[in-house]
Amino acid sequence: MEWKEAFEAAVEKTVGAYEKMEKAIFSDDKEDFKRCHADYCRYIDLFSKATGIPESQFIEIVNDAALKKKDQSKSE
């Protein structure tokens, strides 16, 4: 797997955790939210360290990818 593909997979994995976290908060499931939030934070920490990208920048990349994914699903 090339670096770009690995990076895209890391972003997608983190976006998935973000979406699960969002779903849990809207369903008012506090325990599921805590678990999903822990996963999201773990991915942010792991992938930012692995790529050498500062956490704040990686979070921006993930947020942009999540918004893009939502926009694409709305237009379908």
Image (spheres, rainbow, N blue to C red):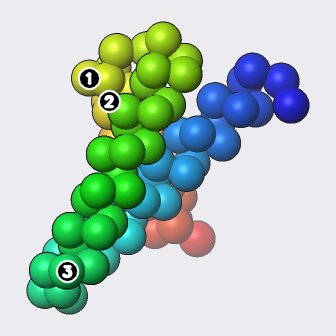
| Precedes in sequence: disc 2 or disc 3 | 3
Q: Nearer the viewer, mark 2 or mark 1?
A: 1
Q: Is residue 37 visible?
A: yes
Residue tagged 2: 60
Q: Mark 2: give few (<14), some (14-19) or many (20+) Cα within 10 Å.
A: few
**Quadrant showing the N terminus:** top right
Identify the residue at image location x=53%, y=40%: 11
Identify the residue at image location x=54%, y=22%: 50
- Give the structural element (helix, strand or loop) at label 3: helix
Q: Is residue 8 left or right of residue 45?
A: right
Identify the residue at image location x=18%, y=86%: 29
Q: Is residue 49 left or right of residue 1?
A: left
Q: Where is residue 19 shown, x and y percent of the image? A: 38, 64
Distance from label 2 to label 3 (Cα)?
26 Å
The picture quadrant where one finds residue 25 is bottom left
- Give the structural element (helix, strand or loop) at label 2: helix
Q: Inspect the image, locate mark 3, and give the three-letter code of the amino acid beneath it.
A: Glu
Q: Where is residue 37 shown, x and y percent of the image? A: 26, 59
Q: Inspect the image, locate mark 1, and give the three-letter code of the amino acid beneath it.
A: Ser
Q: Inspect the image, locate mark 2, and give the three-letter code of the amino acid beneath it.
A: Glu
- Give the structural element (helix, strand or loop) at label 1: helix
Figure label count: 3
The picture quadrant where one finds residue 63 is top left
Distance from label 3 to label 1 (Cα)?
26 Å
Instruction: State the residue in front, 11 or 52.
Output: 52
Q: Where is residue 35 shown, x and y percent of the image? A: 29, 69
Query: Which numbered circle lies on residue 31?
Result: 3
Residue tagged 1: 56
Identify the residue at image location x=58%, y=39%: 10
